[in-house]
Image (cartoon, grey):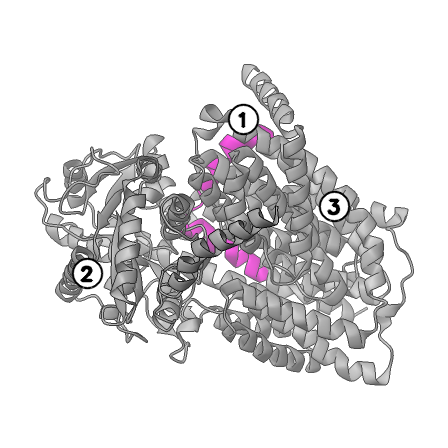
Amino acid sequence: MLKKMLVGIVLGSFLLLPMLAGAQEKYPTKAIELVVPFAAGGSTDVLARLVAKYAPKYFDKPLVVVNKPGGGGITGTEGVVRSKPDGYSLFIGYGSGHDLVTPHFQKMPYDPFKDLLPVCRLSIHSIVMIIRGDAPYKTMKELVEWGKKKPQVTASVSTKAGSVDITFQAVGKATGLKMVTVPFRGGAESVTAIVGGQTDCGGNHPSEVISHIKAKRLIPIAVALENRDPAIPDVPTFKELGYNVVAVGSVKGVAAPKGTPPEVIRYLAERFKKVCDDQEFVKSMKDIGQPVMYQNPQEFGKFLKEGFDQYGKMIKEFNIKLE
Amino acid sequence: MGEFLGMFQGLASGFDIAFTLTNLTFALIGAVLGTMVGILPGLGPSATISLLLPLSFKIGSPVTSIIMMAGIFYGAMYGGSTTSILVNIPGEAASVVTCIDGYQMALKGRAGPALGIAAIGSFIAGTIGVLGLTFVAPPLAEFALKFGPPEYFSLTLFGLLMATLLGGGSILKGLIMVVLGLLLGSVGLDPISGAIRFTWGLHMLQEGIDFVTLAMGMFGVGEIFYNLEKVLKTELVTRKVTHLWPTLKDWADSKWAVIRGSFIGFFIGILPGGGAVISSLVSYAVEKRVSKSPEEFGKGAIQGVAGPESANNAAASASFIPLLTLGIPGNAAIAMIFAALLIQGVQPGPFLITEKPEIFWGVVASMYIGNVMLLILNLPMVGLWVQLLRVPYSILAPIVVLFCCVGVYSIRNTVFDIYVMGIFGVIGYILRKVDLEPGPMILAFVLGPILERAIRQALLISAGSPLIFFTRPISGALMGVLILFIVLQVFFNIRQKKKKMNP
């Protein structure tokens, strides 16, 4: 009996030894925080929680979602920027309005490109133009014809000078309509306004309107991406319809603070890729109107820079100011 | 008729689902948790639901997790009145009005009846709300959609007028506080132009001052500062307790207030955004107007607790209507439930009732049961809470401050908000010293941003013409009532002055 135990202990310590030695470098050794810089219940939050739900299959430690809302996303992101670059505090939602649009208007407490390292892109929330199901126009062409006879065409948008607002200024210019954007407090309120017929049309992300599209209360008429949005593949792009309106929308990726070791970034990018390849995850994401569109760190970094410059050009062109 | 029968069948199947042991247990957990977070200042239902989201995946069944979350939400409405009455701290915006007469009742030793009537009123209103949810949800949801910016402007203007008259004291003092509240409400991003206002370069202020932070500072911390000097001189009046339960007379006084409050709350509560707050205000104003002794209001009138507390509970049930029938979340807590459903692969909206009837009816049925549970839970607690007032103030006050700090911190996980609360505590203390009522200020703070957005959105839609407020039927009717109200008020005032001059 004693002998058996002794053998057991010796064997056990042999097994444990490499684990103890490796513990110092083997990332991750504890739960990884996914910081959502927006309120719980929003689209980025839902995305983060879905990722966290599927993560245990592919990550060695759990992902924990933490909401740090405030300052239009800046507060929570700044928290990640200032945190220890050890890969345990990540920012999810990299590529949202406060990364691509806000820096064109105001001084930031950090540089969204120099102080953050791209880990991967998870999804894109494209900008889709919607009208009410019982509107007197059913397509983009009919809306333009209808609008030309009116003194103005109103469009509900989520916030002033956000990506949707800027894109709709571009729609106004491309179509020759007098487009008046009516800002609401966030996507949910602007959807309620268009569902209630308060405005002539609206701009939203598919995740915000997909249930209303299914219910035929709303009709999507055009998408502002370069190519069609996989979440709503039947809807043509503005380009297909002959209007030069292209915007990257609101990009949803993951970022780590500057100085995070490359092997940690590699681990994360690899594991997030596995989550993105999970067919069940892909289906859940499609159901909520957030298509999975993975990009690795290099592609994602380049993509973000292009998106940032694109908004900068539009803001300059339409002379959008906050005052 | 067939439709009606379908509803009863649906409800019956819903009770089958709600009465399973698992669902009953989770409804109870929700009700208990809800009551607790309602009582703890700062920790609101939306924060609790977000903490419990991961647990809801573990539960697995969407019905069960939504039953629990709904329980937290309406349970918090029961608990919300407790701190308003006992220590003058409104847990959420809809309980601000309860502070006015509820706290006065407690000072007069009538904390028990105030708490009791709040619980009973909440039960009746909650049940009326769920009945409405069962039978008239879809058509009412359609009606709520008709509320656009012009309607919100007219309704909020009405609410603001009520807030001015709320203090019971002079209209001038009410106006001062309302203007102060409007100013504080304008801190942060300009909703229409996007410009940054009054933030002194602080990003933390960019989304404005948080309601809970402001309310706990002005009411809770301010009240404690104020009491500190009193305690040195005399014992606090709150120590004496006359009745534990509402008397028959209390009940007779407040039964109509409860019924009126329930209906006001239900109809205004359907509107997404601000519905519960405005309904509690309207209910208070209505009670004061129909009362034979309006001078009692502000000094501990039981109707001033019964009406608004019923209204905010009915509004809580009603706020499920836009969610379950249209897929539109009306407030932060409902938005969390919305997200929880989405993550579990359930799309709330017009198809919910046909595609997933077990969820719709299961949740509705559980709300009937939940309300009964809450009544049973809350009534015995009244005695316990009243005992709390016997705790020496030197012990109670620091505990309340501690809870306020934890609560405020938990909203956004930052220490910054605790400092902000401290500053408002000092302001609240000064206001009390110069005899200014903080109630109208806080309400204006909540309503101001809604009002500002609505008027500017409406004018964008109408290309600048103010006629939009009068030509749209609902807005026009509201404006009509508003004007009539002001004219009558002026008329009565003049008549009263004349009476005084030549008796």
The residue where tag 2 is placed is: A301
Residue A289 lies in the magenta stretch: no
Instruction: Say what amino acid the circle numbered 2 marks.
Output: Gly
Chain letter for the residue marked with disc 3 in the picture: B
Instruction: Say what amino acid the circle numbered 3 marks.
Output: Gly
The residue where tag 3 is placed is: B121
Q: Name the residue located 50 percent from the left edge and 36 percent from the top edge.
A: B324
Principal secondary structure, stretch drawn in magenta: helix
- What secondary structure is found at the residue carrying circle 3? helix
Residue A37, how many percent across, how many down? 39, 61
| Residue B288 occupies quadrant | bottom right
Chain letter for the residue marked with disc 1 in the picture: B
Q: Is residue A320 shown left or right of residue B79?
A: left
Quarter the C terminus of chain B occupies? bottom right
- The magenta segment: B134-161
The residue where tag 1 is placed is: B358
Chain letter for the residue marked with disc 2 in the picture: A
